[in-house]
Amino acid sequence: MHPILKLVAQRLALGLLLLWAVSLLIFFGVEALPGDAAQAMLGQSATPVALANLREQMGLNDPLVGRYLHWLGGFLTGDLGKAMTNGQDIAKSIGQRLGNTMFLAFWAAIISVPLAITLGLLAARYNGRWPDRLISGVTLATISLPEFVAGYLVLYVLAVKLHLFPSMAMIFPGMGVFERLHAIILPVIVLVMVVLAHMMRMTRAAILNVMQSAYIETAELKGLGPLAVIWRHAFPNAIAPVVNVVMLNLAYLVVGVVVVEVVFVYPGMGQFLVDHVTKRDLPVVQACGMIFAAVYIVLNILADVISILANPRLRHPK
Amino acid sequence: MLDIRNLRIEATSYPPGEAPRHVVLVDDVSVAVAKGRVLGLIGESGAGKSTIGLASMAYGRGGVRLTGGEVWFNGRDIRQADAGALRKMRGHEVTYVAQSAAAAFNPAWRLMDQVIETSLLHGLMTRAEAEARAVALFRKLGLPDPENIGRRYPHQVSGGQLQRVMTAMALCPKPDLVVFDEPTTALDVTTQIDVLAAIKEAIRDTGVAALYITHDLAVVAQIADDILVLRGGRQVEYGTTDAIINHPSQAYTQALVSVRSIDHVEKVSSEPVLTVQNVTARYRGTGFDVLKNVTVDVAAGQTLAIVGESGSGKSTLARVITGLLPATAGRISFAGRVLSPDLAARTKDDLREVQMIYQMADTAMNPRQTVGTIIGRPLEFYFGFRGAEKRAKVQALLEEIEMGRGFIDRYPAELSGGQKQRVCIARALAAKPKLIICDEVTSALDPLVADGILKLLLELQVRENVAYLFITHDLATVKAIADKIAVMYRGQVVRYGSKTDVLTPPFDDYTDLLLSSVPEMRLGWLEAVIGSRKMESAGN
């Protein structure tokens, strides 16, 4: 077998193992909390008889391992059970919310990743001169601003004062793509501001590191211009570290956007999770936890695989 | 074609803990290269030869600036040219071959794409024309499978081959001048000779002019028409190759020509202090033995030199003796007792009595420790000396390695290459060892400095009665220091005996190849030796 296939298969297997470990942690972690789902539903004033009945009805008296396997099996077949609070099918409500979150994350990523890498390349090109300092300064300022401050600031200027965009990023089924895009412009701006600096600085650092190599001097002595040297000779060798940071930020765009969603009243996963945590709706919390973990693991595997593929020594062994 | 007049080059250096300092790297150097001629630039490290080579492309590494004089190339002073004009010139009219082709090729691109890059960039040829020319050059330079080697990545070709590909890359855009910056220094001696011959032939056939930079006078004697000898950024002597080699007028040039002045007579063999018997070893996770059935011994107070090219197992043997790599078979006895193959199972005395000195003195010392701390550590660890007593012992050791007591509070960064290696020797001596393993300890040093280190090692051997296992690829060094020699090839000892026996014919094929590959300081040596070899070098 080609060594690359072996490496990739190893990474995939490792990811699955990790996901399984996370499922154990999430399930038994929630179980270990004081009280249980029945207690949470009926509240402090529930009578012992009512509690016992509900536990029986929800299957909470079954052995722990059996319930874990049932839960895991449901996950694998797409059946996430029903929410305790409103009895709705969890898979269905999460599906819609996850779609919204992915939509927002997708557009934030489409803008921020190329922008961050371009700015990183430019900063490396003008290392230590004013364009570098300007780019570094501005991106550092945007990342230093807490998300809610940035959110309200953008909201105040662009929506309230200038009336350019809607202040609430409401989207609902049946909206056209352009209406949706118009609705999410403000949260996208804020998300881009948050993730830009990290990726840009990593690109810059990785490029500057490669620029020390002897083959960069070779390229300069071939008469290549500075940008051609960076783009053709430095960047292909800086992909691995950059991809890892890009993937971390993409994961953040999916699982870490609670604050931004709340500020713009956007119906995504973050708000959904927060709602159900406050209501102690444990099955929903567990399902969200698993999905977030899966997103993280998948994106990190992807980063690993791209790093492996970007390495000519692994791609073309001796 | 190239005419350098009164060139002055300056840079700003940043010594640790001091204010930035202005240094003059090259001062008042004038030299000219005519069409089709080869000029050799020779000198020790820091002589400014690479700096001058790059200056002929109007390029300065880091903060290096051309601050005076003129560099006329193809009828214009390129010191006055703007960035755009320089880019047009570089890679087209003048090209560059770097010392380490392994580092100078971009690991992410196929060789062919890099070889033809400049020809396409400067719009000199179409892709098909450039590729055809590259293949023709690959063939001329004696590369195997010239049609397909361009499809490989740099890591898939050997060092000697990469150096030839780099030469092809420099010749591809039909330049007027090629700057060769130590193109064979990083190669094994047996590989160097073939690459040297290939470069010489390519230069002759294409009629290109060349600047050939090297620290090895014997190498430059084979290839250059004229030689410029440099020292400390100043011109020492400039003349035809014949004049410089056969009738040097300056004292410094005479010292360079007659370097290796040590005349070492081998000692009569005595009781062995170290016996290596039938040792076999392999690295974990690999399927082949890097050492096969090696048997040698080192007599007390004498020197065994291990000679061979890279990959022959010389350094692995050192790792096995020190216990860093446990042998899979065989026995190592030291001072009358059997050493455990595993480092962890050795006693403190076992560890103390075998010390090691490395090629890179730089990386063998902690840059944040003073010389006193570095040398004092074994004194404290093995003998428990502390405070004033330790300091006095360190100072005594510094005297012994011919450095002043004042060096005790210096940091490694404040020392020269030779001084650093001396400190490493003192650190090894501090443990009062019976055997010191010297792994290529002079390879990174300039010839005159290396000579000083060898003399010191010989003196210390007499005074301290310490044995050396001296690993090197340099036969001149071997002649200067060895009592016995073991020639290694592909993990095996192919020739072993006293120095005189090993260096006296009849030779086996490999030893013959090795001995005949060492550049000799006479004109026409290269052609003579290439014609009379029995065996191909493995590095090709």
Image: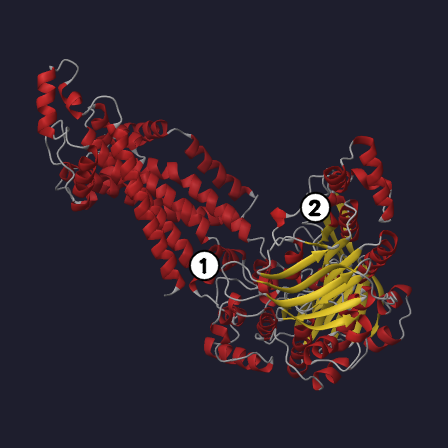
Q: Which of marks 2 and 1 is in front?
A: 2
The residue at which mark 1 appears reads as A311
Tell me the residue at 88%/52% (across/down): B463
Q: Nearer the viewer, residue A245 or B336?
A: B336
**Can I make out residue A298 in this image?**
no
Tell which subunit mark 2 falls on: B
Q: Nearer the viewer, residue B439 or B141?
A: B439
Work out whether A272 lies above or below B211: above
Query: Can you name the residue that lies furthest to the top here?
Result: A45
Query: Can you name the residue that lies furthest to the bottom here?
Result: B531
Q: Which mark is residue B365?
A: 2
The local secondary structure at tag 2 comes to loop
Which amino acid, by three-letter code, is at mark 1? Asn
- Where is residue B196 shown, x and y percent of the image? 68, 76
Q: Which of B257 and B1 is in front in this view?
A: B257
Work out whether A117 lies above or below A41: below
- Where is residue B157 shown, x and y percent of the image? 54, 70
Q: How far apart are marks 2 and 1 (CA)?
A: 32 Å
Quadrant of the rendering where the C terminus of chain B is positioned: bottom right
Mark 2 touches mark 1? (CB < 8 Å): no
Quadrant of the rendering where the N terminus of chain B is positioned: bottom right
Q: Is residue B408 left or right of residue A170?
A: right
Q: Residue A74 carries which label?
A: none
Tell which subunit mark 1 falls on: A
- Where is residue A261 shown, x and y percent of the image? 26, 32
Which amino acid, by three-letter code, is at mark 2? Met
